[in-house]
Image (tube, helix red, strand yellow):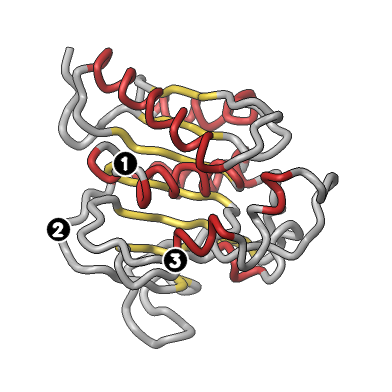
Amino acid sequence: RLPTRTSPPVVLLHGFIDNRSVFLFLRRSLAQHGRHQVESLNYSPLTCDIRTAAELLGRHIEEICERTGSERVDVVGHSLGGLIARYYVQRLGGDLRVRTLVTLGTPHAGTRVVPLANAHPIVRQMRPGSAVLEELNRPCPGCRTQFVSFWSDLDRVMDPLETACLDHPDLTVQNVRVSGIGHLALPVHPAVATGIRQALDTTEPEAGPTTGSTADPETDSQTGKRAGGLTVA
């Protein structure tokens, strides 16, 4: 039972102090639109290192590929889950397995907000300038994964808000702005689910890296360049 080339399995990865139940709505939405191979992974809140979590994610993805017969998967990561998946893609060779990585409210450049227990080691890794974020800033030539990063103008966990935008010269990125949706609501909002489905259903041809904050669906309001992105309100 081989999946079609354009519909690989989808792996969902939750955020800090959360669990896979946050993706119940998104799983249902994906299934209603033909995505029946969807895996929601749990990682322990006791996990203290993004690198270790990324290694475990890689093992899970290898098992999924072996079980389904698919060579690649799509990944959706909320908040910290997006950083874990991004580390796997950029630093552990995961771009061979991950076709598209969608991140929801992920602090790609680090956040200064203090969520609950600032002393937790993995929280410190989400701070601007952390060693893990510096690793993710390193060159990543030839990365095969396409990135779609959803960021919200009402995300109070992201400080500054634009930290949830991904900007890396070696990565093919589409930044998607959503309006009026809080951090915890990103995985359960119907409009975001629609945007995620559209992102996963869009198979871009092999191309060089592109970036753009897509505040307007046709034109990036910050750069004036056509970004081809989505706006979810």
Q: What residue type is disc 2 on? A: Glu
Q: What residue type is disc 1 on? A: Gly
Q: Position of residue 163 (x, y in %)?
A: 59, 67
Q: Quadrant of residue 170?
A: bottom left
Task: Name the disc covering residue 206, or none.
Answer: 2
**Sequence-wise first label, 1 or 3:** 1
Residue 208 in the figure: left or right of residue 16: left
Q: Are marks 3 and 2 in contact (CB under 8 Å)?
A: no
Camera-side residue: 46 or 176?
A: 46
**In the displayed structure, would residue 189 be above or below residue 31?**
below
Secondary structure under badge 2? loop
Secondary structure under badge 1? helix
Residue identifier under label 1: 94
Q: Quadrant of residue 106?
A: bottom right
Q: Quadrant of residue 132?
A: bottom right
Q: Position of residue 95 (x, y in %)?
A: 28, 45
Q: What residue type is disc 3 on? A: Asn
Work out how far the residue at label 3 is from the one at label 2, CA to CA, in angstroms: 22 Å
Residue 199 visible somewhere in the drawing: no
Which residue is situated farthest in the right direction here? 116
Local packing at callout 1 (Cα closer than 10 Å; few below 14, some 14-19, many 20+) is: many
Instruction: Tell me which residue sits at (44%, 70%) in the image.
Output: 167
Residue identifier under label 3: 137
**In the displayed structure, would residue 6 be above or below residue 36?**
below
Secondary structure under badge 3? loop
**In the displayed structure, would residue 155 be above or below residue 9?**
below
Q: Are marks 1 and 3 in contact (CB under 8 Å)?
A: no
Camera-side residue: 189 or 42?
A: 42
Instruction: Tell me which residue sits at (69%, 32%) in the image.
Output: 18
Name the front one of labels 1 and 2.
1
Which residue is situated farthest in the bottom direction here? 224
Local packing at callout 3 (Cα closer than 10 Å; few below 14, some 14-19, many 20+) is: some
